[in-house]
Amino acid sequence: GESVGLHLPTLSVQEGDNSIINCAYSNSASDYFIWYKQESGKGPQFIIDIRSNMDKRQGQRVTVLLNKTVKHLSLQIAATQPGDSAVYFCAENNVGGKLIFGQGTELSVKP
Amino acid sequence: ETGVTQTPRHLVMGMTNKKSLKCEQHLGHNAMYWYKQSAKKPLELMFVYNFKEQTENNSVPSRFSPECPNSSHLFLHLHTLQPEDSALYLCASSQDPWEPSGGGTDTQYFGPGTRLTVL
């Protein structure tokens, strides 16, 4: 079946270190992927997206990598800051046109 | 702020009450969405409206009734809810209309949500 999931429910990193959050998807026909950040008490906030014709895209302090061979998506956050503490969701646009969300990884940044 | 507002932010209601959730987007977008977010579960799409017309009802019980009077406002009317309906209800909007047949890949911008508790 189609599903999007994250490898780890929680991730703890030291302030200043790089963070890597992973996501696996099962639908090889998906052509668009998004990472969202959700802070406590707030709705999901768009971070970065990538289309299936790309394998890497960079934003400000964030990089998304797409490996279509193994159906794997990752979000890299450089120099992680306390303000990066949140739950991170990946989402996949499947052939039905719906965004399918993963369960999320909670990132905690230790000072 | 994402340009999508929701009211109220918190709502407690009994199973016999009738209440409404409101969403407003200030982005000039053409599509609006209702999602349900339960604890430890992924976001679940409930309804989609393109240009004020409902294009998706994701098998949502009839005790949830959406209304979209114009492309900037979206309501979710609630009646005779169950305790298992307690969740965070999120509204989102996107510039491009959502396409049920696929290809709709426009980014969705979310509001802060309404935390609903049904007693």
Image (cartoon, coloured by chain):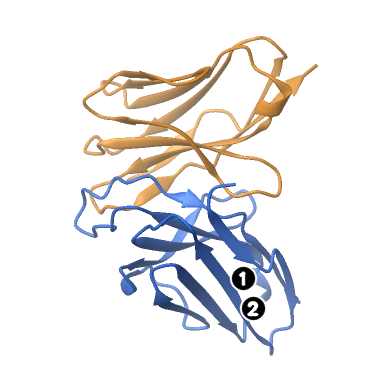
Chain colours: A orange, B blue
Q: Is residue A46 above or below residue B114?
A: above
Q: SS for tag 2?
A: loop
The residue tagged with tag 1: helix, strand or loop? helix
Looking at the picture, how far across and down is residue B48, in whole percent?
37, 66
Q: Residue, x 33% and y 45% (percent of image)?
A: A2
Res A80 quadrant in image? top right
Q: Is residue B20 above or below residue A71?
A: below
Q: Which residue is under mark 1? A: B85
Front residue of this view, candidates B53 and A66? B53
Q: Quadrant of the C terminus of chain A?
A: top right
Give whichever of B4, B37 is nearer the camera.
Answer: B4
Q: Amino acid at mark 2?
A: Gln
Q: Amino acid at mark 1?
A: Asp
Tell me, yes or no, whether the two marked residues, 1 and 2, touch with CB atoms within 8 Å: yes
Task: Give the side of residue B85 with respect to residue B99, left or right.
Answer: right
**Crowding at mark 2 (Cα within 10 Å: few <14, some 14-19, many 20+):** some
Identify the residue position indicated by label 2 in the image: B82
Q: Nearer the viewer, residue B53 or A7?
A: B53
**Residue at left 69%, top 29%?**
A85
Crowd class of label 1 (few under 14; some 14 to 19; many from 20; radius 10 Å):
some
Residue B56 position, x and y percent, is 32, 68
Identify which residue is drawn at 53% across, 56% down. B4
| Subunit under mark 1 | B
The circle on residue A35 is none
Question: Residue at the spot x=29%, y=19% of the render?
Answer: A55
Chain label for disc 2 = B
Above or below for B44 versus A32: below
Relative to residue B56, is residue B115 drawn left or right? right
- Cα separation, mark 1 vs mark 2, equals 5 Å
Q: Position of residue A44 (x, y in %)?
A: 55, 45
